[in-house]
Image (tube, rainbow, N blue to C red):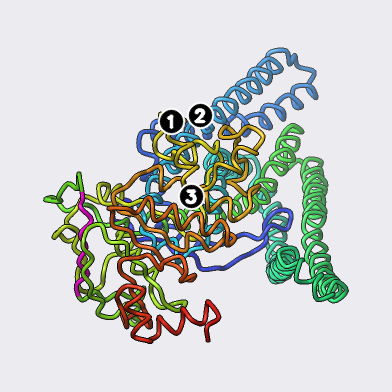
Amino acid sequence: MAVRGIPPSNLSGITRPGRGGMVVVKPKNMKGTLARLWELTKGNRRGLFMVLVLSAFGSGASILSPYITGKTVTMVSHSEPITWILIYLSVLYLCDWLIKFSQAFLMAAIGQRVIHHIRRTLFSHVKKLPLSFFDRHQHGELMSRLTNDVDNISTTISSSMTMLLTYGFTIVGVFIAMVSLSPVLTLVSLFGVGLIFLLTRTVTKRTRKLFAERQKALGILNGHVEESISGLLVVKAFCREEQMEREFEEKNDALCRVAIKALIWSGFLMPLMNVINNLCYVTIAVFSSVLYVKGYIGEIGLITSFLLYIRQFTRPFVEIANIYNNFQTAVAGAERVFEILDEEPEPEDRPDANDLADPRGDFEIKNVRFGYTPEKLVLKDISVKIPAGTRVAIVGPTGSGKTTLVNLLTRFYDVTDGSILLDGVDLRDYKMRDLRRAFGVVLQDTALFAATVRENIAYGHEDAALERVVEAARIAGADGFISRLPKGYDTVLEQGGMELSQGERQLLTIARAIFANAPILILDEATSSVDTLTEQKIRQSILHISENRTSFIIAHRLATIRDSDLIIFVENGEIVEQGSHDELMSRGGKYAQMYKTQIGAL
């Protein structure tokens, strides 16, 4: 989803220190990313033009005030009345305040409207992305892009951009004013600016490396802390508390040492710059006084104006350096956002796509080949016919391709070769929304939301009657523990169900699938997190809800799928055996061997 065909941006991974020791990410394609951001400002450009004009006027007010102040000093030295001058200054400062307020007001509104558009576009695009995208990216990284990176863009648009414009106009205007007052004094003052640039270059060259080392040490320490806390039970079980603490101390000490060095070096910068500024100020004051005494400067007020300009001229350079660092971080964040927007969404429905109103559930898998990467196939030439109403169990060793096969049925992925037919029609010829609604899915990884138990079970059916919800929970075997919750079915799952046990969360997802009453059912390791007694209850529930509907059951516990009409044994991406439980047991093949191993018959 590139904007106007501008090529997508990539991060270079280059970092350098910003204000307060913050590591600044340097974008690789600054020009291209800024062009894409500019495209997103459509509808707000009149406001941006007003901000530009206000920045110019604001800088003009700042530039005029030292000149008028100098004139005031000259008039006082000549005992002339200064009443109107003071009024002019008061009006000028008032106008300066109004301009800055209007500028901030406009940029806040424009910035938030642009960010609102970015957030909406980004979130809308994320929900259209294929499952393969989320397999390639960690959830924490995506959350960082949706929140932190967008916030960085917001801060830059709202404040940093305004300040950059204002300081840019100020530097140019002040320099022109200084040259017009005294080219000689301007030349002397440029010597101080050169020293500031040299100092900044020297210090940042050292601190860039130190802050990069600090971030690396911080990442190592954070990784150790996360690993230690998440594995604390194992640490205690193996009596490794002292070793864990020693490792923490070593990593913490390493971080402390490099952080001290980095902060000391970065701490040199501002005091030394203040010293240079003060020396420059004193030098100009002395030199201009000598010129005045010798008659080369005709007005005492000129010295006052020039000294005020010196303060205005050097300060923006320091501020622009810090703002530019923040600006680079925001642009790098924009690149990360655009990387998501450049991802191809799920394939859209074909123009002549078929509706799927009342599927029978008759499947035919014909010569299906699939790989997450082209060079490595997960499924190799899978073919099988599944009549409507068949209860199918897919079994096999870990990594054999069982879940992959189910993902192809729901079109979370599309086949590499071959085809999957539902009721005689290729899955790709159906409307995606109709196809997904035909499936009731229970995955191995439970997904519950921060809502009531009732809303989680009736997910997607906001006006569902409580009686239907209770019935679905009862069939799934979840009604018992739900009734013991503080508010029963109206209990809010604050942390997406983390306050429940893994087995209880699994039961709720099974109840959700039962409630959906979809004509095709998929249960991917639905009983992997429940005890044996609950497993038997769920087995009876599965038999009940899968009656007269096509069901696909993935299970490692083979006892739960003995009643299946068809058992498919998958190994290394191929179907090596298929048949009923009794047929496969009589053959004495791999299924029979696995089953006997589980029940202890070997």
Decide if residue 293 is in sight here. Answer: yes
Q: Relative to the observer, which residue lies in front, 39 or 342? A: 342
**Of the residues under marks 3 and 1, which one precedes in the sequence?**
1
Q: Which residue is mark 2?
A: 106
User: Quick check: 412 above or below 448?
Assistant: below
The structure residue drawn at horizontal position 36% and vertical position 55%, both measured from the top left corner, is: 129
* Residues marked 2 and 3 touching at CB (< 8 Å): no
Is 242 positioned to the left or the right of 221 in the image?
A: right
Task: Give the residues in magenta.
Answer: 359-366
Q: Amino acid at mark 2?
A: Leu
Q: Which residue is mark 3?
A: 509
Q: Relative to the observer, which residue lies in front, 319 or 505? A: 505
Find residue 47 and name its label: 1
Q: Relative to the observer, which residue lies in front, 68 or 185? A: 68
User: Quick check: 18 above or below 171?
Assistant: below
* Residues marked 1 and 2 touching at CB (< 8 Å): yes
Comparing labels 3 and 1, the label whose residue is closer to the camera: 3
**Of the residues under marks 2 and 3, which one precedes in the sequence?**
2
